[in-house]
Image: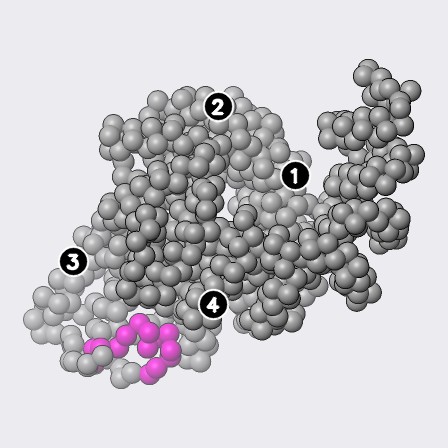
Amino acid sequence: TATTTGVGGAKAGRSVGEIANGEDTEEASTAEAATIQGWEIRMYRERIVRLSRAGKWEAAWELLRELTDERGGPGDRFMYQSVLSSVIKHGQDVRIDAGVGVGKNNGYYSIPLAIVQHMVDNGVDLDNTMYTTIIKVFSKKSDQHGWDSSLRLLDVMIKRGLKPPPAAFTSAISACGNTRPLANWRAAERLMHDLRQAGHRPNTRICNALMRTYARAKQWRRAQRLFDSMAIGGDVFSSVDDEDLTQPGEIPLSDPDPDPDPVPVPVAVAGNDDQRLQTRPDAFTYTTLIHAYAGADMPEAALRVLRQMRSNGMDPNVVTLCASIRACCGQRGRFWRQAVEIYSEMQEAGMLDHAGDGDGPGGEALRSIISVMAHTGKWKKALELFRTDPSPSYQTCASMIEAYSRSGMWEPALKLAEEMVSFRGFQLNGLTYRALIRACRKKRRWQTAVALFQQMRANRQTVTEGAIADTLLTFRSARGAWIRALHFIRAFSSSVITSEEQEWEYISPLVSEAKSLLKNGPQARTNMRSVLHALLALCDDQAKWKISLQVHKVLVEETNVSPNAETYERMMVACAKAGEPEQAAKVLSLADRWLGPQMVSSKLHVGVIVAHAQKREWEVALSKLLDLQRNGVHTGVGAYNAVMGAMASAYQWRQAAELLRLMDIAGLQPDYTTYDTLIDVHEQCGQWEKALSIYERMEGHLDAEVFERRSRSKMHRAAAWMGFAVDETEGAPY
């Protein structure tokens, strides 16, 4: 930045980035401008402070610039601090109208940073309070620069002999929690160690910021451990030091512990009463822990936290109850009845008021319960709830569209979207367009999905990789879906369009947007993974392994799109369905090359076995299965079922029975496919008595209701071979 002489002889041009890097600059001159009197400066200061406290930060900011830029007067730290605090507190509602940036985050933090830059250019020195305020500004950013700049600012404070206050650590930890796509919980834990070295004791606000970071990072075990330490007044730092709670990136899909307590009793030692008061969990703590379990798809544990909150004598507020309702979306809405009970409780308590603002408590609760109904497929119930709001907000309408989308009700979804635009004056955003596109997938309305995608482009809504992937997946139900993937790859790898097929006109906008997104830097190559997986999904159903390898070559090898384990698992599905063990082994070697041996999942090894089994090479498949078992690789029931199916095709009933014995030794529970295959091969080989004995074992092991529905035909056929009749009332041969 070019340096110029600013107000009062200060050397301008020092950037906020230089502050974060700790670069030293010349001290500002203390000479006062001769064009303004001291009493005028005091009047400016009083007016700036008064406007800032009233939330009129724009007027205060204009007045401060008038003082420094037009009148040539000096602005002090107190004036800048007042304006900055007002922006942070009141700037949320006007950040889009401020004319700075397009996105919400952009408009929020660009203005405070502009104020800080103006302050630095005018030679105002920074103290503890100003550094803390700047860190709080950075904490609002959702990219890597937010937490990175916050940590560097803390280091600068320490280097300059300033002791960062607890509020600075709280904001820096919050910055780690705001990082996308997952919170940087390891950086937050490092800040906790710095907090201890600075001689500070943790308080509830700091612990809440750390717990929120854990929740955003899907580290539910660490969140629970921190909560336990807070509750008993123990050493919070010891809970941060524990490295054995979870592996990096571990995201549980269900609650593995049926016990009333979600995690073991904490090992932290109870502290004194003073420490317990400083870290006592509040409503925000309980709400954040509920969010942590909701993110881990553990609704039962989230509801348990709500009960614990009430048992401890705390009344949950609207935010906590709405979070509990949303947690019931997990496990496909299995706990929807509990969500309805909480919603009814809020109605009886008078917490819901649909006559007010749609973005208020009533609107948030309504959106939450509609989301639960959407996840459980009860769109009619969701519609009844939606109609209780006479003036639904945009977000409420979007939640109803999501409910339609999950049930494949594309016509009502489009009708509601048209009503939102025509009668309510809303403008559909990218997320709503994606929900409408997904609604077309189940009903095979890919033409409508493509039209929606083009409409989204025409309305200048932000097109993301997810929108492209959602549109591609609607082709999956169409005949010859793999042809679309082939056309996409050919057009993507060539700058000249040579295809004259009719399908190309539908692929063209998708290819154009994908190429445009790849220009956004390295992160775009990671985000493009969703498009890669969508193209591979088009090759799965018809086992087009050649096309899937071509997709990998163009997007991964030539374009450097970042693959992961799911990439090669999808490729393996195509090879396994086609019965191509050689190609399956090639996919396994590609995974080893691009991911590394440690990231190769057991599903890929199972895929090679399935490919051999699909080719009816049961001896080779069995040999590879036993090798994996000896090497300690968990294969699951699916691998055994595939080998057993190959044995059944070769009429190897003795080998199939032996494989069932090996499953018992391995501690694997046979499923319906296992028993059905065993019964089939024994029937085909005339082993009717053994078939009936397997049937009896199946009856004792499996769920009674589903067993009756899925296995009755097996019993009829086996009994018929032996000349028995079947009692229709008892369901047993006699």
- The reply, left or right, for residue 485 in relation to residue 234 is left
According to the picture, the residue beneath numbered tag 4 turns out to be: 553
- Whole-angstrom CA distance, mark 3 to mark 1, is 54 Å
Report whether 82 appears left or right of 145: left
Quarter of the picture holding the N terminus = bottom left
Camera-near label (4 vs 2) is 4
Rendered image: mark on residue 380: 2
Q: Can residue 147 be seen in this view?
A: no
Amino acid at circle 3: Leu
Residue bearing mark 3 = 63
Task: Report the Cα–Cα distance between label 1 and label 4.
Answer: 44 Å
In the picture provided, is 63 more to the left or to the right than 657?
left
Q: Give the range drawn in magenta.
A: 11-24
Residue tagged by mark 1? 300
Q: What element carries label 3?
A: helix
* Foreground residue among 604 and 217: 604
Q: How many C-alpha atoms fall within 10 Å of the one at disc 2: few (<14), some, or many (≥20)?
A: some
Q: In the rendered image, is residue 127 in sight?
A: yes
**Residue type at numbered disc 1:** Glu
Sequence-wise first label, 2 or 1: 1
- Mark 1 lies on a secondary structure that is helix
Q: Where is residue 78 in the image (x, y as percent from the top left)?
A: 28, 63
